[in-house]
Image (cartoon, rainbow, N blue to C red):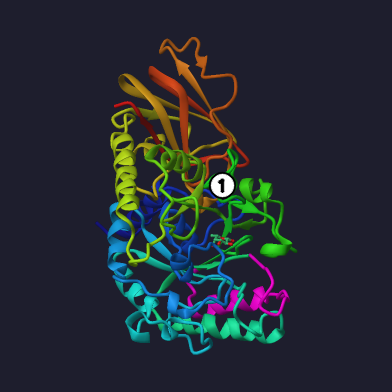
Amino acid sequence: MRTSHIATLSVIFTLLAASCEPLAPEPYGPVPTEAQLAWQRMEINMFCHFGPNTFSGAEWGTGDESEALFNPTALDCRQWVDVAEQAGMKGIILTAKHHDGFCLWPSAYSSHTVTQSPWNEGHGDVLREFTDACRGRVKAGLYLSPWDRHDSTYGTPQYNDRFVATLEEVLSSYHDIYEQWFDGANGEGPNGKRQKYDWQRFNATVARLQPNALVFSDVGPGCRWVGNEEGRAGETCWSTIDVEGCEPGTGNPPSDLLTHGKQGGKSWIPAEADVSIRPGWFWHADELPKTVDELMEIYYNSVGRNALLLLNVPPDTTGRISAEDSAVLVAFRAERDRIFSKDLAQGAKASAWHRPGHRAKNVLDTAYHTYWAATGKKAELTLELDSVTEFDIIVIQEYIPLGQRVTSVGLLLDPGDGLYSYTLGDSPLCTTVGYKRIIRLSHPIRWRKLVFQFEGMAPPVINRIALYNSDK
Ligand code: FUL
């Protein structure tokens, strides 16, 4: 063959190959950063409230309690990590400094720290032990309360300098931090004054020293408070929201807006649902953990509604997570595994109009980055199951790297003759989907051919549909 023919053929082949390449749809609206996506995929993380309150029985320390209070008898941060791993949690956030101002590390900017406590004869460092224990196993995050009831400069501009110096200290002395948790609480300091927090500087300090860390606050910028402490996102829950002019704490948007987010909002600030396994945030001898059923309800209302669940599990006075709490966490994990280990949609035939290369069958595989891309804002996807199947839970995931688009999902039960279908219920199955939506049906359905009806602000992009039976 002549060289010119070979060249022509190779151009044709290249063009053909290019035309078969799946063309990714354009992103729609704001999209998550890589760090936000990785964070959302963690799904359930652990919160650890630990400090002088653990020993005094208080929830909000006054700031003048003696450092002698802090004396865990058998601190074991590796045990926290063991429990988190067994419970299927991917990260742990520790209260390095709560409102009482006590620092769990030997801070150069405070004399109200572990150094002044009897624990390890003043040579201990909980943050060191915590971040070392997390390394390579789960991600570590830090809670630092700007509200400080101990610091004498609180209520003056010097306090902001001190808080920034403290942040710099913790963010540069330990390992990588995946989330910096800023509590919006803003009460009075020891001199009766309130502080005007310099949020811009606080956020910029995190961005400079831990560029991959998400900043949690009531209004982000990394992730936002869900607006309640019950672990409940809205039935409609957008990861988009408008927060211009808002500030954590005093300048918060209405909690309803935080719970639901805003369709068409300008910023991607997904919701984090923080809730405690016990009535209090800190460990108290007379309190008991929630039951598995209560935790499952929380799971459905948070992870199942496009939020991340941050479940607080407070270590006790020994410095370990109590046997009651770890037992219920292991049972909570076992219950999730029991329900969600067998996807009944596997083996089904999926069909729909689709953009080239992004076929309907992609909703059935477990690869994260393959998806079905619909051709219009209203789109149907048919799942023909192997046989008549009983299910009562439907899980749907939008491929959020291309934005959150879906505004409603309905389901038709097709008798298979193509002539007519039954609508399931009068209303759609759900409104928003987002990263993950878990729909619990009021009663199990036995059917074979299902037609999902999607509507979106832009053509839906779905990376997963799965069916489960909670009874089996
Ligand atoms: C609140 C605090 O006042 C509570 O003590 C707890 O730390 C909770 C997670 O945030 O704002």
Judging depth in this view, the residue of 57 and 420 nearest the camera is 57
Q: Residue furthest right?
A: 245
Q: Main secondary structure of the magenta part?
A: loop
Residue at mark 1: 404
Q: Is residue 264 visible?
A: no
Q: How many marks?
A: 1
187 drawn magenta: yes
Judging depth in this view, the residue of 17 and 287 nearest the camera is 287
Q: Is residue 35 above or below residue 348?
A: below
**Picture coordinates of residue 182 (x, y %)?**
57, 68
Q: Is residue 450 visible?
A: yes
Quadrant housing the C terminus: top left
Q: Residue furthest bottom?
A: 108
SS at mark 1? loop
**Mark 1 residue crowding within 10 angstroms, few (<14) / some (14–19) / many (20+):** many
**Picture coordinates of residue 65 (x, y %)?**
53, 76
**Picture coordinates of residue 171 (x, y %)?**
47, 79
Q: Residue furthest left?
A: 1
Q: Quadrant of residue 295?
A: top left
State the residue at coordinates (75%, 64%).
245
State the residue at coordinates (72%, 74%).
194
* Span highlighted in magenta in the image: 185-213
State the residue at coordinates (49%, 80%).
209
Judging depth in this view, the residue of 86 and 262 nearest the camera is 86
| Amino acid at pointer 1 | Gln
Q: Is residue 433 above or below residue 423?
A: below
Q: Ligand 1 sits in which quadrant? A: bottom right
Judging depth in this view, the residue of 36 and 334 nearest the camera is 334
451 drawn magenta: no
